[in-house]
Image (spheres, rainbow, N blue to C red):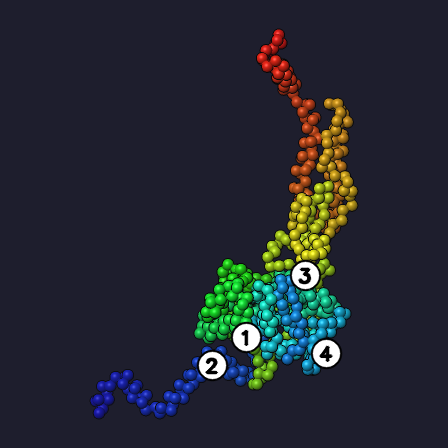
Amino acid sequence: MGNAAAGDSAAELLLRAAALVPPAHYALAALLLACAFLYRFLELHLIGDLLRGLRGGRVALTFHPASHVYHRVASKCRSLHGRQLYTVRDGGTIALDWLLASDCEEEDVGFCDGVISRDDSTPLVVVIPGLTSDSTAAYVKHLVFSMASKGWNVVVGNHRGLGGISITSDCFYNAGWTEDFREIVNYLHQKYPQAPLFAVGTSIGANILVKYLGEEGEGTPVAGAVSICSPWDLLVTNRFIQRKLVQRCYDKALAIGLKGYAKLHQPVLARLANWEDIRKSRSIREFDRHATCVVAKYETVDTFYRRCSSANYISNVSVPLLCISALDDPLCTREAIPWDECRANKNIVLATAPNGGHLAFFQGLTAGKLWWVGAVSEFLLALHDSPCMHRQKAQEHSLHTSLESSIDKSPYVNFMEDGMVTAVTNDDANNSDSDNPISNEMELRNGMVGVQQDGIATEIQNECDGNRSQENVTPAQGPVGSQEQPKQNIDKIQDAIAPVKISINQLIRSQGRSVWLLTYIAFVTSWPFLGALGFILFRKKFRNSLPAKRGSVRDLANVKLLWRGRDGSGSTHGYPH
């Protein structure tokens, strides 16, 4: 036996030792491995919470060192009723669900238009839900009741086709569609001008909100905003949810939700796109290819993702903005978070928590509260009590569509026929066309030149008489070699350029920062007119001062032509050749 045992290999000895272990121990080990796998697969963090005493993970803040929004605001932060149907310009219908501060504890109170006084200064919060979500979503209710209980009025701007409302136009919402929110904001600001206006966006709604703020810049009436779990970069996010098994499960689940949304509006969508391709979509990307890109007229899915990513608009955000994201978000990956862009903008504070998932951040063992809801309330309350609230410029910002180009932005400098310089803005055009208040097209006689001046247009008033136009100046008649002719020509030229001089002086007083640029523009656009004017004035003088030899040859040629025309023979009849 001893020899036999000595001849056994190491593998055989290991197997014999393993056979001595009770089967119950193996079952326990398998159970532990399965639990560990599921813990990581489902991205749970219960053990970490227990080790930290259920205090949650530390929130990291990213902000500009000189940010007043952080030092004065963020650093201080420790079931709906009523419905209003709003019709947008293209005929689409949006459901606005209201909850007022005065009614947050009452039930079955119907909404009636005008319940809020026009002079009411109670802060108003506009909420933008996430993808396929509306005012019935649990996280939306948490936020709305939290803000209403603190004395604020809240309105949820449901996406088109959600909240039980049918699609009434050929336009559907998407991750980059900011026009509906723009109309809602301007409508609320005009209807309740004394109420400070704030906005909160969640998930896709956060992407829409940040993109809108970047598009509007200083022109938005929004005083402050909060972004919750924004995807930031749609292309990166789409790549991420197709990478791992658990993310692909989320991808399919969201695609099912999108197809359910499409099913509600099949008659309209089937007329605009291929319904069978939409029905067979198994991912968000496939749905966007067959539905979103076709309806919104994007060339490719990647083009849609790139153009609609809110990360491209962060640098132009001009209102205090708190951005909350979870590093373990299974949908909106940390890889898409624009850390440097947020750090470079003094108006943005980026708060990242190690755990929280997507729109979760549950608190307590029963998950009865959402941490981000409390953070939103604290931030907005602190912002409202601080001098950091954004205030719209005195000049109202004109509505514009996503199809506008940057050259269509005011101010413009117009050189009129009489040589005067005036500034023309989009607002001037809007005021002159009451039937189309958002028109951006202006017909000018001599064209426009775009000038950037911090986005503020100033109208320049001219003080010179428009009757002094010299475009139709004719050369003075008089004897050749008259001594009065040069003086008269000079006086006429000076009269012609006098309006330009006066306008430039006016520009120097009111537009000192851009005077050299405007002087250059005036010179470049005026020299063809002055050159033509000089040519007309001095043409006769130049003609009469030509060399005598050239004049004698011309006169002799004229005599020959006249003589030949008398008899057609060409004979000189005694005249010398």
Q: Residue furthest top?
A: 574
Which circle marks residue 102 in the picture? 4
Between the residue at mark 2 and the residue at mark 3, the CA separation in whole angstroms equals: 48 Å
| Residue depicted at 74% across the width and 45% down the height | 503
Picture coordinates of residue 4, whole percent (x, y) = 21, 89
Q: CA distance from mark 1 to mark 3?
A: 31 Å
Indicate which disc, 1 or 3, sits on the residue closer to the N terminus.
3
Q: Is residue 44 left or right of residue 112?
A: left
Q: Are marks 3 and 4 in contact (CB under 8 Å)?
A: no
Mark number displayed over residue 358: 1
- Which amino acid lies under the numbered mark 3 shown in the image of this protein? Gly
Q: Nearer the viewer, mark 3 or mark 4?
A: 4
Q: Amino acid at mark 1?
A: His
Residues tagged 4 and 1 counted as in contact (Cβ below 8 A): no
| Residue denoted by label 3 | 219
User: What amino acid does circle 2 point to?
Assistant: Tyr
In the rendered view, would you say 308 is above or below 577?
A: below
